[in-house]
Amino acid sequence: MESKNYPVGRVTYIFEFEIVPGKEDEFWKFMEEEGTPFWLSFPEVESYTVYSKMGGHGGYEGHVVIKDFALMDKINSHPLCGPTGKRCAELTQNFQRRFLLLSKVYVKE
């Protein structure tokens, strides 16, 4: 098995949530028109992915991969962060967040 080192500081911001019942269409429209464009407007964001979950807490999990943790200050101070977060909070419930710091990746040879 080969081990590859990736850039130190690379972070995955993870948020788990459920969509408010009856607001599914409104939530996905918001994500396509506002939520996703907000995250992808930052050049330092490598990817933004939303998963349906088959266990654990929450029905969905979002992953935002960023180059380093310092970017979170830039994101949180952006003028659209507050309104985008507020709208997301209106459409979701049981929201939890955490961060993963990349240490090492193992790949098949």
Image (cartoon, rainbow, N blue to C red):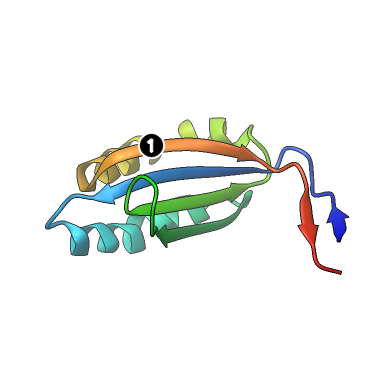
> Total of numbered circles in the picture?
1
Image quadrant of residue 67? top right
Q: Residue furthest left?
A: 22
Kindly identify the amino acid type of the residue bearing the numbered disc 1: Gln
Residue placed most toward the observer, 59 or 89? 59
- CA neighbours of label 1 inside 10 A, class few (<14), some (14 to 19), many (20+): few
**Which x, y percent locates residue 74?**
55, 34
Picture layout, residue 37 above or below residue 11: below
**Disc 1 designates what residue?**
96
The C terminus lies in quadrant: bottom right
Q: Residue at x 39, y 58 (%)?
A: 53
Task: Name which residue lies at 34% across and 35% down.
Answer: 82
Of the 4 image quadrants, the one containing the N terminus is bottom right
Q: Quadrant of residue 89?
A: top left
Residue 79 at least partly seen: no
Measured as percent of width and height from the top left, residue 99 is found at 55, 37
Disc 1 secondary structure class: strand
Residue furthest bottom as drawn:
109
Q: Is residue 33 left or right of 51 when viewed as pictured?
A: left
- Asked whether the viewer can see residue 24, the reply is yes
Of the pair 96 and 74, the residue shown nearer to us: 96
- The answer to whether 86 appears left or right of 53 in the picture is left
Which residue is located at x 47 percent, y 32 percent?
76
Q: Residue at x 26, y 63 (%)?
A: 29
